């Protein structure tokens, strides 16, 4: 894991409307190294999907207004590429796995044919060779009796199986980057774990870089190498998955990690974060998290802390970081 596969710099997205501006994303940077799985975590409405759509250049404008200094994919600057060029890149260099397989799959085409098409389009294979690869790929993601299942239509499969098909589809062209936006949210908990395991194995076997988007921190524990925590359109912390769980700096990260139920917990004994994310048109002054933060002072109500970037790669946006060795340090 050395060079970056994705470098995103200063992404800003607003949705203007008659009453003002929805500031969905407020200047975020993301780095994903080759073969690395990076998770983007945060509660509903904090800007995760808008960020992923912006990277794919899939935001509709209008209504979205996007500004970005750089979206560099494996050395290629894609921020100003034409839609025609982007269509070549999507599905070949970047693929996305959405939450809802039923809308992502074509309902009137067999799943086999949908995967065949990717091989035919991107790798110039014959129909026969494509089908051989399709069956292999379905097998790899754990679809039983792949050969006959390939002739099924999406509605003939269970939700978990459909999600496996989406994973097979996303990997079919061997992209440089996979974006998975809440890939298992719609599934039962046990099926969720199986599908995540498949996704993780595929990502590691093929050494593809991945951006895993989720509001559920427990999902990232087994999957991600690095975690970015987003709150109300801003990154508030970046750290390795181990540090996120063992020594979170930001009170929001700490609260998120405390809200993850542990096996030893009795039902509902985990902590819930009070209140909710601010409405994007009415964000508070100062640190956006201060109304929900147990440690907030006057300073936090008045000023937004800068995102501090440490030499070891950790980043945090807080005047009073938790679990921080040097409590007297300058956290402005
Ligand atoms: N097309 C749109 N028009 C106006 N506002 C939008 C549009 N798309 C997103 N937003 C707003 O941008 C903000 C960020 O939305 P986004 O979908 O990125 O959240 P999210 O973090 O993915 O949440 P979730 O976990 O619920 O998927 C929200 O306040 C949302 O209402
Ligand atoms: Mg979303």
Image (cartoon, helix red, strand yellow):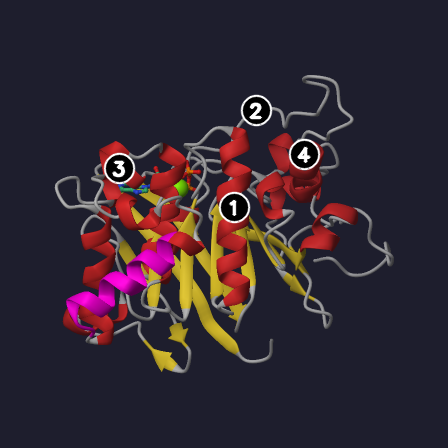
Q: Which residue is mark 4?
A: 293
Q: Which circle's residue, 3 or 4, is located before the other in the chain?
A: 3
Q: Which residue is mark 1?
A: 196
Where residue 219 sits: x, y (%)?
58, 42
Image quadrant of ligand 1 equals: top left
* C-alpha separation, residue under disc 2 versus residue under disc 4: 10 Å
Kindly indicate the quadrant of the structure image that contains residue 302: top right
Q: Reply yes or no: does residue 91 show up in magenta.
A: no
Alpha-carbon neighbours of circle 4 within 10 Å: few (<14), some, or many (≥20)? some
Mark 4 CB within 8 Å of ligand 1: no
Kindly identify the residue that appears in the image at 37 percent across and 39 percent down: 161
272 vs 95: above or below = above
Q: Which residue is mark 3?
A: 102
Alpha-carbon neighbours of circle 3 within 10 Å: few (<14), some, or many (≥20)? some
* C-alpha separation, residue under disc 3 versus residue under disc 1: 18 Å
* C-alpha separation, residue under disc 3 versus residue under disc 4: 39 Å
Element type at mark 2? loop
**Which quadrant of the figure contains the C terminus?**
bottom right
Q: Which circle's residue, 4 or 1, is located before the other in the chain?
A: 1
Q: Which residue is mark 2?
A: 275
Whether residue 213 is visible to the viewer of this picture, yes or no, is yes
Comparing labels 4 and 1, the label whose residue is closer to the camera: 1
Direction from residue 186 to residue 86 in the image, left or right? left
Whether residue 119 is visible to the viewer of this picture, yes or no, is no
**Which quadrant of the figure contains the N terminus?**
bottom right
| Residue bounds of the magenta highlight | 125-138
Q: Nearer the viewer, residue 76 or 141?
A: 141
Alpha-carbon neighbours of circle 2 within 10 Å: few (<14), some, or many (≥20)? few
* C-alpha separation, residue under disc 4 versus residue under disc 1: 32 Å
Mostly what secondary structure, the magenta segment? Answer: helix
């Amino acid at each position: 894991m050395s060079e970056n596969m994705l470098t995103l710099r200063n992404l800003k997205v607003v949705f203007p409307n008659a009453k003002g501006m929805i500031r969905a994303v407020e200047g975020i940077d993301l780095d994903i190294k080759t073969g690395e799985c990076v998770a983007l975590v945060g509660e509903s409405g904090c800007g995760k999907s808008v960020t992923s759509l912006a990277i794919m250049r899939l935001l509709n404008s209008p209504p979205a207004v996007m500004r970005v200094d750089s979206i560099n994919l494996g050395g290629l600057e894609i921020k100003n590429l034409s839609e025609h060029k982007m269509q070549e890149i999507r599905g070949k260099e970047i693929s996305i796995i959405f939450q809802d397989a039923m809308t992502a799959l074509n309902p009137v085409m067999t799943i086999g044919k949908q995967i065949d098409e990717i091989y035919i389009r991107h790798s110039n294979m014959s129909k026969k060779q494509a089908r051989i690869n399709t069956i292999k790929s379905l097998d790899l993601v754990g679809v039983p009796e792949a050969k006959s299942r390939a002739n099924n239509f999406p509605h003939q499969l269970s939700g978990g199986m459909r999600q496996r098909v989406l994973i097979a589809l996303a990997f079919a062209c061997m992209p440089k980057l996979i974006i998975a936006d809440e890939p298992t949210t719609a599934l039962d908990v046990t099926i969720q774990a199986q599908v995540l395991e498949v996704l993780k194995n595929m990502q590691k076997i093929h050494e593809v870089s991945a951006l895993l988007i989720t509001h559920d921190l427990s999902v990232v524990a087994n999957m991600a190498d690095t975690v970015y925590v987003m709150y109300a359109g801003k990154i508030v912390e970046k750290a390795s998955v181990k540090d996120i769980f063992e020594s979170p700096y930001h009170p929001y990260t700490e609260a998120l990690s405390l809200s993850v139920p542990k096996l030893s917990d009795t039902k509902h004994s985990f902590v819930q974060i009070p209140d909710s994310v601010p409405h994007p048109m009415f964000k508070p002054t100062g640190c956006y998290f201060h109304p929900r933060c147990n440690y907030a002072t006057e300073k936090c109500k008045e000023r937004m802390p800068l995102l501090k970037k440490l030499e070891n790669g950790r980043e945090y946006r807080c005047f009073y970081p938790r679990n921080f060795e040097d409590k007297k340090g300058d956290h402005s």
